[in-house]
Image (spheres, rainbow, N blue to C red):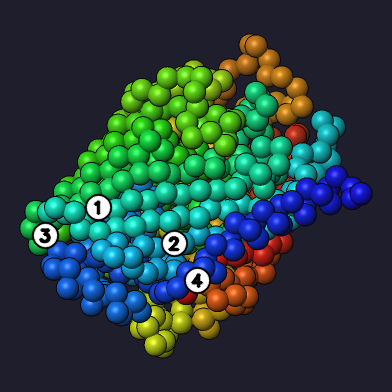
Amino acid sequence: MFPRTWRRSLRTFISASLFFGLPALAQQSSEMPADHSMNSMDHSSHDMSSMAQMPGMIMQPGNLIEAQLNHLSSGTTVEPASTPMYMVMGWHGPWMWMLHGEAFVTDTQQQAAQTPEGRRGGDKFFSTNWIMPMAMRRVGPGQLTLRAMFSLEPATVTARQYPLLFQQGETAFGKPIVDGQHPHNFFMEVGALYDIKLSERTLLSFYAAPIGDPAIGPVAFPHRMSASENPLAALGHHQEDSTHIAYNVLTTGLTWRWFRLEGSGFHGGEPGEGRWQFQPSENGLAIDSYSSRLTFAPNPNWNIQYSIAHITDPEPNAHEDQQRQTASIMYNRSFGPRDANGLTTGNWSSTLIWGRTNSHGRMNSYLAESLLKFSRKNYVWTRIENAARSNQLLLNPDEPTPSHFHEEPIGHVAAFSFGYDRDFRIAKHITAAPGAQFTTYNTPDSLQATYGNHPWGVAAFVRFRIAP
């Protein structure tokens, strides 16, 4: 009855709408900054009942320990304690539950110059999305947190990718993805965390997840505040934070005042093309990789991390181990008058990231992004990248990879993105923000014959978010 492209667009929109209809059932809500901690669990159940009667209460952490106990991002990653977090929350007996997530419904146009080898890029209507329910309570001497994360991207990102010039990593239909970003899995995380306060200044933490985020890299781009209004993935994703969905993750961490040291064991293979599976069944999922991360957070506005990892056979077609290093600096500052809950009407969040992988040769990527919220409902942002690319970008995406092909670095691509959106409340616990983003690229000499000098991309979107 409808053309195929219309049917796909309608299916994408309906899926995203249904996905974010769930929060309308919530009974209690609060917009909590990431500094809202479960400190009352260190006391009696009477204290927890008091918190239940004051869901809008904001608790300012005095150190990294209190911020870590929130567990409001994937794995054991943490942003500056002053970073706002949007969610609905409530209580069920001794359990405190929270629900947060977002969805982008996006139309993107990615265009490179016409060259003798053809035109790269494309256009697509799609949705990226995730939702994260979690619950926590006191168990024995510590705090137990149960958390899951889901995405409908296997359905709302058709053909196993969306267009993104110069992006590479993972596969679609058995071939390396070129100029495209893969969808996330339906199961993004299923895990449990247990934290024990050894003293007022010391926290011992454990994390176990059949699907989770090991201690490598900063907060991944889908959950990072400075990237929260950007509808597209970072070009340096696979050098900086691509392990945020890994299998059979075990992490132990020790926090003392402003410092945190973590170590993880996990399965190094990245998710395959069976995006609906809980875990792939065709390969063994032994813990064969390891990582460590050091975090320094001297005050609620700063977070600095360095991490290093050995990842066994991450890419299905490459069959090479990878060494990865990352470093990041995050800064967040709230400003402006406060509302009834004590939250400010403005916020500024910025991130600097360096990521290096060493498997097909040493590849370094750099990212700087900043998001400014002002006048309560308006957002402007930028993302600037200098990302190492490999000769995979020279492959014809419509043809099989040649048997003699060997991946190696070929140059750096610079990308400059700028965007704006504005929030509108459309339901009790849902906001929508229509917006747009423009990106221009600088192409290295080695890729100009394929892409031209200055390709560009534009994205028009509506961002839906769970909100109080």
Q: Residues within 10 Å of mark 3 (few under 14, many from 20)?
A: some
Q: Residues within 10 Å of mark 1 (few under 14, many from 20)?
A: many
Q: Which mark is residue 99?
A: 2
Q: Secondary structure at mark 4?
A: loop
- CA distance for labels 3 and 4: 33 Å
Q: Do the residues bearing badges 4 and 1 touch, measured as CB atoms within 8 Å?
A: no
- CA distance for labels 2 and 1: 17 Å
The reply, left or right, for residue 191 in relation to residue 379 is left
- Is 367 above or below relative to 325? below
Q: Which mark is residue 330?
A: none
Mark 3 or 4 closer to N-term?
A: 3
Q: Which residue is mark 1?
A: 144
Q: Do the residues bearing badges 2 and 3 touch, measured as CB atoms within 8 Å?
A: no
Q: Do the residues bearing badges 3 and 4 touch, measured as CB atoms within 8 Å?
A: no
Asked whether residue 285 is in view, the answer is yes
Farthest residue, direction left: 199
Q: Residue at x 63, y 70 (%)?
A: 433
Residue type at the position of mark 2: Leu
Q: Secondary structure at mark 1?
A: strand
- Depth check, front residue: 427 or 410: 427
Residue type at the position of mark 4: Ala
